[in-house]
Image: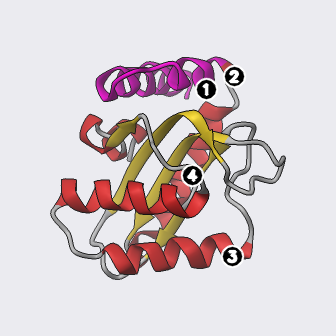
Amino acid sequence: MFLHEVFPPELIKVGLEAEDKDEAFEEMVDHFCQTEKTNAREEILEVLREREAKMSTGIHKGIAIPHGKTNALDNVYGVLGISKKGVDYDALDGEPVYLLFMILASQKDSEKHLRLLKRLAELLENPQFYTELAAQNDSQGAYGIIRKYEDVLIALD
């Protein structure tokens, strides 16, 4: 499974309006539920908040990877949120977050979920990926950056 499959343009939200972590979760989950035509909003928010209560997923400068698994879903999905003003996320470094890679999975998709987290971590090792992605002004452009850097990563495998 590839990141570009999990983060298609319709699940990329450029210009997040949220000012804090909980608002970001709600905004991104609402976008997901509208796009995917699901009414699993409360279940998804609950698993994200439970996971976040263990330790902040604001793990890298300007980047958060909120994630969770729930039986309310039947596959692995991603929602990318790009904030131009930054989200107060209680990140480990105390800095605002600009890129939020939300990964949602069914309980049975633990292996796919972990592989996606690993691939995302590999891409985030390249600071240029972050810089180019954060600079995008529309979902198609953001999707193109994911494809570009993932294609390079695949070629190196």
Identify the residue under disc 2: 127
Residue 136 lies in the magenta stretch: yes
Q: Do the residues bearing badges 3 and 2 touch, measured as CB atoms within 8 Å?
A: no
Q: Which segment did they paint magenta?
A: 128-157
Residue 3's disc number: none
Disc 4 marks a residue whose amino acid type is Leu
User: How far apart are labels 3 and 2 at the CA level?
Assistant: 28 Å
Please indicate, yes or no, whether residue 112 appears anywhere in the rendered image.
no
Instruction: Name the residue located 57 percent from the left edge and 49 percent from the top edge.
Output: 19
Tag in front: 4 or 3: 3
Tag in front: 3 or 2: 3
Residue 53's disc number: 3
Disc 3 marks a residue whose amino acid type is Ala
Mark sitting earlier along the chain (3/2): 3
Nearer to me, 148 or 32: 32
User: How far apart are labels 2 and 1 at the CA level?
Assistant: 5 Å
User: How far apart are labels 1 and 4 at the CA level?
Assistant: 16 Å
Disc 2 marks a residue whose amino acid type is Pro
Identify the residue under disc 4: 117
Q: Do the residues bearing badges 2 and 1 touch, measured as CB atoms within 8 Å?
A: yes
Report x, y in % for residue 21. Answer: 59, 58
User: How far apart are labels 2 and 4 at the CA level?
Assistant: 17 Å
Mark sitting earlier along the chain (1/3): 3
Q: Is residue 78 above or below residue 15?
A: below
Whether residue 65 sits left or right of residue 112 in the image: it is right
Residue farthest to the right, as pictured: 93
Neighbor class of circle 3 (other Cα within 10 Å; few <14, some 14-19, many 20+) is: few
Q: Secondary structure at mark 2?
A: helix
Residue 130's disc number: 1
Residue 25 lies in the magenta stretch: no
Please indicate, yes or no, whether residue 68 appears anywhere in the rendered image.
yes
Instruction: Name the residue located 64 percent from the left edge and 33 percent from the top edge.
Output: 124
